[in-house]
Image: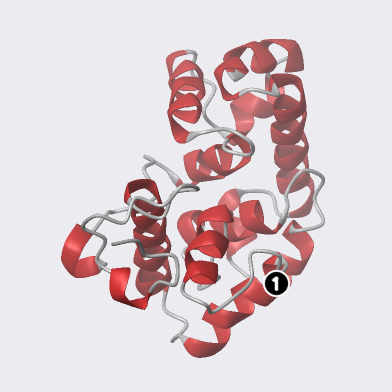
Amino acid sequence: MYRRYGALNWWPADTPFEVCVGAILTQNTNWLNVEKAIANLKREGLLSAEAIREVPQERLADMVRPSGFFNVKSARLKGFVQWLFERHGSLEGMFAGEWQKLREELIRVPGIGPETCDSILLYAGEKPSFVVDAYTRRFFSRLGLVSEKDDYHRVRALFMEHLPNEVPLFNEYHALIVEQCKRHCRKKPSCDGCPLGRACCHATP
């Protein structure tokens, strides 16, 4: 996949905090919608932990409206920032300790599920925690390595236990999986020109 697609330089963000916001906003929507919401926050000077802490939730919800479920997501952003300041004081403080302990803590924050948690750890904190999403399950189930019904932790373990725990590797690998699924490994496969057609049990002539 790397030979086909090259370096994808994911996650697209200007700051680690922007990654955290994007990881929360991308739940149950596509990235184009997230970009619109983030553009709103940038325009209004609200893309910082301090600003999100101080802004009224109604206004925050209006800013993130393009991402969908805007009332829920504004509450999750507020909750994450409140936890961040109360527990760690800053994003730098949050990432300063052992990342495995941070993962156990972060995943218990309301609205921060495993995928969001690992996205924050990998892309904002540069910690070697592999991210699994629907694309990962679909792609590797078609290669016969997992089942689409396998839970998050079982699929993640496949990568954590068989790959070197290296941030650049995890970063690029996940981005390549997303690109592969957008181009070829769709819900209805588009196999023409797929670089992995020979290994896929769903490949069509």
Q: Position of residue 106 (x, y in %)?
A: 73, 58
Image position of 183 (left or right of 81): left
Residue 127 visible in the shown view:
no
Which kind of residue does numbered mark 1 sit on?
His
Residue 177 position (above or below residue 201)? above
Identify the residue at horizontal 82%, vertical 45% (top origin).
110
Q: Quadrant of the N terminus?
A: bottom left
Near-viewer residue (85 or 69): 69
* Horizontal side of residue 136 vs 84, given as left or right: left
What residue is drawn where x is 35% and y is 56%? Answer: 180
Could you tell me if residue 13 is visible in this image?
yes
Q: Looking at the rendering, which quadrant does residue 163 occupy? A: bottom left
Which quadrant of the figure has residue 39? top left
Q: Residue furthest front?
A: 205
Q: Position of residue 69 (x, y in %)?
A: 70, 24
Crowd band around label 1 with a 10 angstrom C-alpha radius: few (<14), some (14–19), many (20+): few
Q: Is residue 190 above or below residue 44?
A: below
Q: Using the image, determine if residue 113 lies above or below residue 111.
A: below
Q: Is 142 placed left or right of 89 in the picture?
A: left
In the rendering, at what x and y percent does residue 119 appear? 55, 55
| Image point (72%, 41%), residue name | 80
Q: Nearer the viewer, residue 57 or 92?
A: 57
Quadrant of the image for the C terminus?
bottom left
- Relative placement, left or right, of 57 versus 66 is right
Q: Residue at x 35, y 70 (%)?
A: 168
Coloring applied to the structure: secondary structure
User: What is the x, y in percent for residue 117?
Assistant: 65, 56
Residue beneath disc 1: 153
Under circle 1, the secondary element is: helix
